[in-house]
Image (spheres, rainbow, N blue to C red):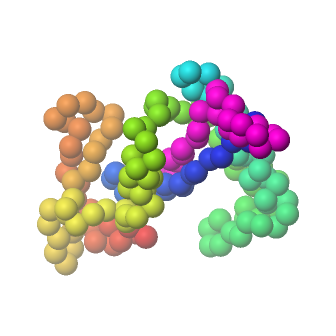
Amino acid sequence: ARIGITAVLHTWGSAMTHHPHVHMIVPGGGIALDGSHWISSRPAFLLPVRVLGKLFRHLFLTRLLQFHDAGRLAFFGSAAPLADRQAFVKYLSPVRRKRWIVYAKPPFAGPEAVLAYLSRYTHRVAISNSRLIAFDETDVTFRYKDYRRDGCDRQQVMTLAVDEFIRRFL
């Protein structure tokens, strides 16, 4: 079957630290190759999440290396040495060994819910005004979620120097 995917690359976490991850909508099936009918996947998910994590990692890194070989990636500043293929492959080496986590949820309650979910990641900036607590010439204080904690400890407060806040925001 031909399946479709809608994906959004999200490059920061709640504390505005570098945390690249992908939010993705994957249908539970696809259109038959001859276009005549819908083919459903298994009742739960298209693939088991452990298999999906390994497969996505392999396909993503393989394609990334193909883009590099084709000259479709650009590297600037401190990343400029990664333009060399050998340096790029070495840089990716730890990522190939790391387990990529897949979190899968059952289908949404319809197309409107799917659009509402994805729009949260496509139509916002790194931090909303409602999370800002205080700021002055030297510091910015804001709320963030620490996903390693549970319950009321999950909401945390962080104060950063203005230049570090701007660096994270950008």
Q: Nearer the viewer, residue 161 or 146?
A: 146
Whether residue 139 is situated above or below residue 10 in the rendered picture? below
Query: Residue placed at 71% from the left, 37% from the top?
Result: 37
Q: Nearer the viewer, residue 106 or 149?
A: 106
Whether residue 21 is situated above or below residue 162 in the rendered picture? above
Give coordinates of residue 117: x percent, y percent: 40, 49
Quarter occupied by the C terminus: bottom left
Give coordinates of residue 85: x percent, y percent: 82, 57
Quarter occupied by the N terminus: top right
Residue lying furthest right = 70
Query: Residue placed at 59% from the left, 38% from the top?
Result: 27
- Residue 96 in view in this figure: no
In the image, taking residue 10 as reference, residue 34 lies left or right, namely right
Query: Residue placed at 65% from the left, 72% from the top?
Result: 76
Q: Nearer the viewer, residue 161 or 132?
A: 132
In the image, taking residue 66 as reference, residue 77 lies left or right, namely left
